[in-house]
Image: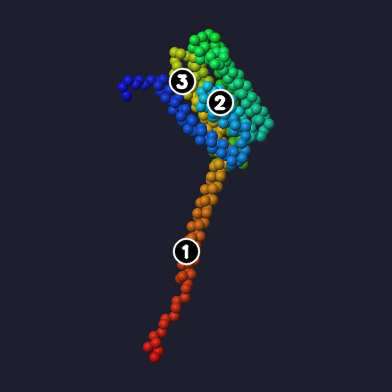
Amino acid sequence: MAPGITYSSDNVLAWAISITAVITLVLIWPLFFLRVYVRAFVVRSFGLDDWFMGLSVLMHIMILFFILEYIFLKLSLGFQFLRLLTATWERLILYSAVLVTTVLGTVHFFFFLFFCGVPQHYAIVLFTQPQKCHSEKADTILQYLQVTTSMAFDLIVVALPLRHVIITPSMNVRTKLTVSGILLLGVGGLIATIVRLVRLSDIYDVEAPQTGTVGALVSAIEPALFVIGGCLGTLRPLVAKTLKITQKTGGSTRMSNASTIAQGSISGSVWNKTPALPPVEDETEQA
């Protein structure tokens, strides 16, 4: 252990948050650019879900817009799954979930924006005259409402597609495994939401700040899992195109090799079948 450095649970959790942030950014941005390439250039169908996903990815790197990230992420997932769901009752449930999540998220955003009055003086008022800010209780109630609706939304976007995976007989095994793998990311995000809900009461606990750090950690993991799953769900055309090109290249190589072997065989057979020249008689013997 290096001298002068102490290691505690707070240090470990702080490092965990930093490492999680780096890992999620490294995973999210390449997948998002692949999603843009597929939707804009491969299938040529860049929609609202892609725009909202882009806004969500941008908000992910700005901690002050954490609430906006949730709004755009839920909108993106909602529009993305609306393309997959055909039953009217399923679409109504998803529309309702998107609407409730968006409204509550918007209310929470503006409440937090004007938490201490004019946004320009937020930091000054918060640290010098905290009595002028809204009560922590009101903020906690809004956070509980947002996390609860977010958890309900996550459950809906996981359960409805899973239902189609189970009851659709025409879906082949590979597709079912792929969809199930993506839905597992959604399940992970749902678990993170539940953990965040449990830890929500510890946000203002000054005696145990590490509990709030755990909440911050799962708050970083939860949207990242849904962003990764949402981007992976759009990459199927790119994978199919890559496999097609690979198979075509492999087939051309095999045909070229077969043609070379065949030409060699033909040349060998022609050479072997060339008639031998008659022996030259000795003129001395004829004389």
Disc 2 residue type (three-letter) = Glu
Amino acid type, mark 3: Thr
Nearer to us in this view, 116 or 218: 116
User: In whole angstroms, how far apart are the C-alphas of marks 2 and 1?
Assistant: 64 Å
Please give left or right for residue 182 compared with residue 91 in the image. left
**Number of residues whose C-alpha sits closer than 10 Å to that of mark 2, classed few (under 14), some (14–19) or many (20 or more):** many
Q: How many marks?
A: 3
Q: Position of residue 132 (x, y in %)?
A: 54, 9
Q: Earlier in the sequence, mark 3 or mark 2?
A: 2
Residue closest to the eye, 228 or 174: 228
The residues tagged by marks 1 and 3 sit, at their Cα atoms, a distance apart of 71 Å
The quarter of the image holding the C terminus is bottom left
Q: Position of residue 257 (x, y in %)?
A: 49, 57
Residue at point 59%, 42% (across, down)? 42
Query: Considering only order in the chain, which callout, 3 or 1, is on the residue closer to the N terminus?
Result: 3
User: x%, y% of residue 252?
Assistant: 52, 54
| Residue named by callout 1 | 264
Q: Which badge, 2 or 1, comes first in the chain's sequence?
A: 2
Instruction: Tell me if label 1 and label 3 are in contact, CB under 8 Å.
Output: no
Residue at 59% of width from left, 25% of height from top? 71
Identified by mark 1, the residue type is Gly
Pick out the residue farthest to the right. Answer: 88
Quick check: marks 2 and 1 in contact, CB under 8 Å? no
Evaluate whether residue 175 shows in this view.
Answer: no
Estimate the spatial distance between the alpha carbons at disc 3 and disc 2, rounded to whole Å: 19 Å
Q: Which residue is mark 2?
A: 69
Residue 204 showing in the rendered view: yes
Crowd around label 3: few <14 · some 14–19 · many ≥20 (10 Å) = some
Going by the picture, which residue comes out furthest to the bottom? 287
Q: Nearer the viewer, mark 3 or mark 2?
A: 2
- The residue where tag 3 is placed is 213
